Structure formats: structure tokens, C-alpha cells
Image: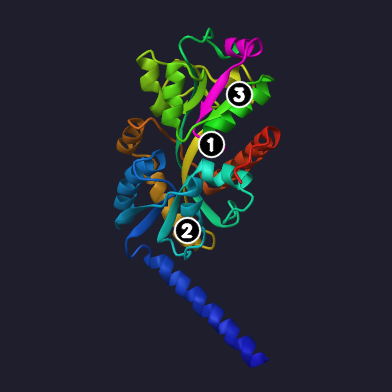
Amino acid sequence: MYVRLLAALLALCGALGTMAIHAETYPSRPVTIVVPGGAAGAVDSVARVFAQYLGQQIGQPVVIDDRPGAGGNIGTELVAKASPDGYMLLMAASSAQTINPLLYSKIPFDPVKDFAPIGLIATAPYALVVNPKVPANTVAELIALAKKQPLYYGSAGNGSLNHLLAEMLKSSAGIDMTHVPYKGVSAAATDTVSGQVQVLFGSLPGVMPLVRSGQLRALAVATAQRTKLAPELPTISETVPGCQTTAWYGLMAPAGTPTAVLDKLQVATTKVLASKEFSDALAKQGVEIMGSTSQQFKALIAQDLATWSKVVKTSGVKVD
């Protein structure tokens, strides 16, 4: 028995020693960032810009591995089950990390226990837009209109962020609107322009060109504070307190990754976010830098899970 115990202790010491050496030499080869979405999507675009600057900081190439499917679950699961050595990371998306676990009856990962948050990278503000023929120029006027006549809102599909944002507004403002799901936000935007549906929540990069061309009217943004990307727009929460959220993207590693490795990645990430060139590059894509500590990132995940849990419960939305 004592021999087995001694052997186990020696093995543990050896493993800890190997982890320490690994942390000292990390990274000694290219690092992969998995994107839980398709190429040219919002998460992919942010990840590719970030990877370029991160590689400069850590002295190794950083490659992007797009893994679309199941609303982001496939790519997220891949990293959750990866070796915790710092060589496979996740560009986490808020929808996959804090909404999917509430929508799917079976989820192949735990959004909290399976990951080690490194830091937030950026946020993508969403805007509330309407067809120009809708007689509402403010959130208050839209709420008043919804109480008088039927309104239809489009989304990128059942359980999408567009969908749940509208459900949050319905619940918070005490109004009713009918959901019309589409196979993607582009189709929903097209039908909002044509008047088939009247209301839509869309990311600023996606809807602002249509707003500036007069094809849609923007009423407000869903962020907690006004965004510098569209400073002329008020927030929804100025009219409906508590009705706010934003899509975010953040860097994560598999749970169990050595602390020294996580620290190196966080320091490198902080330096990337301090770069004006990086900030300008993201602004061109309609997203804003949003750095954080790992603890702040954990707190945001917990907060979002609680927020969306209430919305999902109230609306009764389920994917499977």
C-alpha cells in the first residue's frame, strides 16, 4: 500500500514538474484559436484580427480553426475537451456560452466548469430598428404602438440573440409582438425593409448601412450605455430600465490550463487591447474593444446566464 502511495506521489510530483517546465517554455509552437462559427462571420472576423496581434505578442503564429454547427456548440465543445496546455483556445461567443446552455436540453459542455476565462476582447452592439413606415421614432412610441395594433418582428431563428432580445423587450415593456423566425438575419432584415415584418434587432454592422440609406429607422441600441459607434442613438434602457445586453467575444482556455500559461495569455491579450491599431481595426468591423480580468469575465458569464435564464423561462423558448 505504501509503495503504491509513494508511486502515486512521485507521479504527481513529476506531472507538476512537467507542467511547470511547460509553463516556462510556453508557447514553443503555434497556438490555435477555435471559432465556433463559419468563416467570414462576426466571431471569425474578430478572431482573425486578434490572432494577428496576439501572435506578435507571444512570438508564435496564431491560427484560426473555424468549427461551425449547432449554433456554436460544436466548436465550443471541441475546446472544452481539448488538452489544457494553452495550445488550443476558444474565441467564445456570448450566444454559445450563455444562451445555448439554456435552450438545448442536452449540451455537450458546461459553460462555467469546462473553461478558464482569459479575458473579454470585444462587444458588438445591437440596435432596435423598424421599417420606415412604422409610425414610431422612439422606443416609447413603439411600445405605445404595440399596445394598439399587432406588430411582427423578425429574427435569425428560434433562440437567436435577435429573438431573445425582442422577447426581453416584450417582457420588460409589457407588450406583445409576433415572432417571425428566418434562416438568417439577412433574410429577416430584407423582410423588415420590405415591410413583411416591422421590427428587428440587428448588430450595428449589419443594420446601420440600411439605416443610413433610409431603408430602416434605428430607434435605440441595446447596450447599457450609448455606443461611440452610433452616439446619436439612445439606449433602450433609458426608456425601459433593465432591458439591455450586448454580444461579446472573449478568449478562453480549457479548464485545468496551468495558471502560469493563463497569466502569459492574459498579459499578451492586455497588450493587444492597448494597441490603437487593433482598436481601429475592430471599429471598422462595427465592434468595440472591451477588456477585462479573468474574474470580471467570469462575473459577466454568470450575469448573462442569469439574465437569459429569466428571458427563456418567461418566453418558453426551446431549441430541442
Q: Is residue 143 magenta?
A: yes
Percent of width and height locating residue 71: 50, 45
Q: At numbered mark 1, what does the secondary structure look like: helix, strand or loop?
A: loop
Residue 231 against residue 53 in the figure, above or below: above
Q: Which residue is mark 2?
A: 78
Label 3 neighbourhood size at 10 Å, few (<14), some (14-19), many (20+)? some
CA distance separating discs 2 and 1: 21 Å
Q: At numbered mark 2, what does the secondary structure look like: helix, strand or loop?
A: helix
Q: Which residue is mark 3?
A: 178
CA distance separating discs 2 and 3: 36 Å
Q: Quadrant of residue 142?
A: top right
Eye-nearest disc, 1 or 3 = 3
Q: In the picture, which quadrant includes the N terminus?
A: bottom right
- Say which amino acid is labelled 2: Leu
Q: Earlier in the sequence, mark 2 or mark 3?
A: 2
Percent of width and height locating residue 160: 53, 36
- Furthest residue to the front? 196
- Say which amino acid is labelled 1: Ser
Q: At numbered mark 3, what does the secondary structure look like: helix, strand or loop?
A: strand
Q: Earlier in the sequence, mark 1 or mark 3?
A: 1
Q: Nearer the viewer, residue 169 or 254?
A: 169
Is 295 on the left or on the right of 282, as rendered? right
Q: Which residue is mark 1?
A: 160
- Say which amino acid is labelled 3: Thr
Residue 59 against residue 286 in the figure, above or below: below
Residue numbers of the magenta segment? 141-159
